Image (cartoon, rainbow, N blue to C red):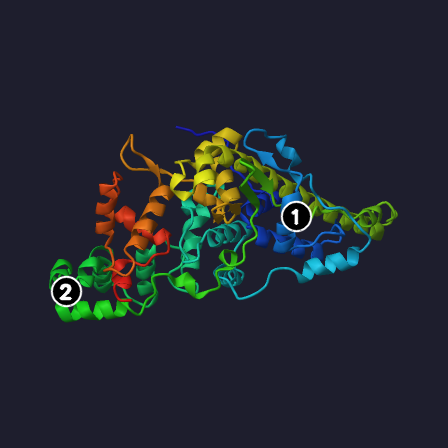
């Protein structure tokens, strides 16, 4: 049998992320303070960008202008959302002074967990896509060092291939135990970082996951039997446990939780809910007309053409940034409109009235991908009559039996109240909290209570019982 050569064609679908798309993903997830830093860096490096002369970056500036803002929207009458930036301040002739003030006012202070981790990420030999995934993971960590949002949901599909490797890299960073789901996972990661492995790690895992409540109740004999080790070995494992920290991120400055510049505000004003965007904390960037005109004056020789190409590239980069910031703010505004309507009872009555609301439902309403809502909600803050809170707090899954469902956030608030009511008494176990919730008609398993308590930054009972 003879074979003749044949030409075969096949199609392979592959998405190549452009630098502009990568930057758009990144800007969506940046909190306002970090976006200010990014703008500062771009202004310093790109002569095509011009900073408005009268713009000042400060929370006080935002607060003082909030009462006279023109972009208010009530829950009854939404104007065209493209007008959210209509209250930009005017301009004067003190451009250089204002520019310098912006540079000097870039937020500084004690190192936050995110800053500490980002400095380590910058030392790793990573390609652009891997670095972006690392940055998204780090900005997705709360004050404890735990995930705010499941990273498998947060990371865009086209970048998920990098997630496992980047998590391994971040798990080698200081402090040990960050980038996990909860304090139990953190303790196990810290144990591995200290060299624990094999059978000893399995025993320690059994202690941490299933037996800490029994240890607090002084039932060491039962725990030793459960794990299958002698009492003295159990005591050694428990002593080792006490050298670890359940919340490794808390040794760093809390950053946004201590100094918050909210992206927007929804508050009551004369009986109506008013939505206001914090336009005063971001400058209305524009292209420097003098720098742009240099392109027309460059001439025609080779050196002039190179100069012209340099100018045009910087103008394109500046325009990309301006457009992406506009998209970020516009998307945030549209999400806020939905939150105002769907979480109306919360804004009027408080945290116990947060309704079940998913990011997917909001994404469908404003016709964007669910990951876009996730990114735009990450590390963003909203000023309400009940305090300045993360926007993510207003997204909540349903908890409890069908017909008697409450939002996850509402149940967490009830758990907080239960613990506050029992302050000074013997620390309530997660099972006891679950039983109390059941008496209130809310069916929540013990492990779910433990998860919610952790998200409330409340220590487990074995720690609270030792205070």
Establish if 303 lies above or below 84. below
Q: Residue at x 21, y 46 (%)?
A: 435
**Residue 193 x %, y %:** 35, 65
Res 113 seen here: yes
As helix, strand or loop, the secondary structure at mark 1 comes to helix
Measuring from the top left, give residue 238's x and y in whole percent.
Answer: 23, 67
Q: Residue at x 53, y 50 (%)?
A: 132
Determine whether label 1 and label 2 are within 8 Å by CB: no
Judged from the image, the secondary structure of the residue bearing numbered disc 2 is helix
Task: Tell me, yes or no, if residue 6 can be seen here.
Answer: no
**Disc on the earlier residue, 1 or 2:** 1
Residue 438 location, x and y as percent? 23, 42
The one of 325 and 92 positioned closer to us in this rendering: 92
Q: Nearer the viewer, residue 233 or 163?
A: 233
Q: If the image is split into quadrants, where does the N terminus sit?
A: top left
Report whether 189 appears left or right of 249.
left
| Residue 194 image-quadrant placement | bottom left
The number of numbered discs placed on residues in the rendered structure image is 2
Mark 1 neighbour density, 10 Å: few (under 14) some (14–19) many (20 or more): some
- The image position of residue 221, as x and y in percent, is 11, 64
Q: Residues within 10 Å of mark 2 (few under 14, many from 20)?
A: some
| Residue 220: mark | 2
In-image side of 241 versus 110 (left or right): left
Q: Residue at x 52, y 48 (%)?
A: 381
Alpha-carbon span between mark 1 and mark 2: 61 Å
Residue at horizontal 63%, vertical 55%? 60
Instruction: Look at mark 1 in the image and give the residue it sits on.
Output: 65
Residue 357, placed above or below residue 314: above
């Amino acid at each position: 049998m003879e074979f003749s050569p044949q030409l075969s064609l096949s199609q392979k679908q592959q998405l190549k992320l452009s630098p502009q798309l990568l930057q758009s993903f990144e800007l969506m997830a940046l909190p306002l303070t970090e976006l200010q830093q990014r703008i500062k860096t771009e202004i310093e490096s790109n002569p095509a960008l011009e900073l408005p002369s009268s713009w000042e970056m400060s929370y006080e500036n935002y607060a003082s202008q909030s009462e006279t803002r023109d972009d208010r929207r009530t829950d009854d009458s939404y104007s065209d959302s493209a007008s959210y930036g209509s209250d930009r301040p005017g301009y004067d002739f003190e451009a250089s002074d204002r520019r310098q003030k912006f540079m000097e006012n870039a937020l500084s202070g004690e190192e936050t967990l995110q800053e500490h981790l980002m400095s380590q990420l910058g030392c790793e030999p990573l390609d652009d896509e891997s670095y972006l995934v690392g940055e998204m993971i780090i900005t997705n960590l709360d004050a404890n060092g735990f995930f705010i949002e499941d990273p498998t949901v947060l990371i865009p599909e086209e970048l998920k291939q990098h997630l496992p490797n980047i998590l391994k890299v971040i798990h080698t960073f200081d402090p040990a135990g960050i980038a996990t789901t909860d304090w139990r996972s953190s303790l196990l990661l810290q144990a591995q970082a200290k060299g624990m492995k094999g059978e000893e790690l399995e025993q320690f895992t059994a202690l941490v996951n299933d037996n800490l409540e029994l240890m607090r109740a002084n039932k060491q004999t039962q725990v030793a039997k459960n794990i299958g080790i002698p009492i003295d070995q159990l005591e050694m494992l428990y002593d080792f446990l006490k050298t670890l920290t359940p919340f490794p991120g808390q040794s760093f400055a809390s950053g946004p939780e201590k100094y918050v510049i909210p992206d927007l505000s929804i508050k009551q004003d004369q009986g109506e809910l008013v939505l206001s965007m914090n336009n005063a904390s971001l400058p209305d960037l524009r292209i420097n007309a003098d720098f742009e005109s240099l392109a027309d004056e460059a001439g025609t020789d080779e050196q002039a053409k190179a100069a012209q190409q340099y100018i045009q590239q910087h103008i394109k980069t500046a325009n990309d940034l301006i457009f992406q910031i506009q998209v970020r703010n516009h998307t945030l505004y549209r999400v806020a409109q939905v939150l105002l309507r769907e979480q109306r009872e919360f804004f009027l009555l408080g945290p116990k009235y947060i309704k079940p609301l998913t990011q997917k439902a909001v994404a469908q309403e404003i016709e964007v991908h669910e990951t876009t809502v996730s990114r735009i909600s990450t590390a963003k803050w909203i000023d309400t009559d009940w305090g300045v809170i993360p926007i993510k707090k207003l997204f909540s899954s349903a908890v409890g039996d069908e017909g008697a469902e409450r939002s996850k956030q509402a149940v967490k608030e009830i758990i907080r109240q239960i613990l506050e009511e029992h302050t000074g008494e013997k620390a309530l176990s997660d099972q006891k909290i679950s039983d109390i919730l059941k008496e209130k008609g809310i069916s929540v398993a013990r492990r779910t209570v433990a998860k919610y308590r952790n998200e409330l930054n409340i220590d487990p009972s074995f720690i609270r019982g030792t205070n």
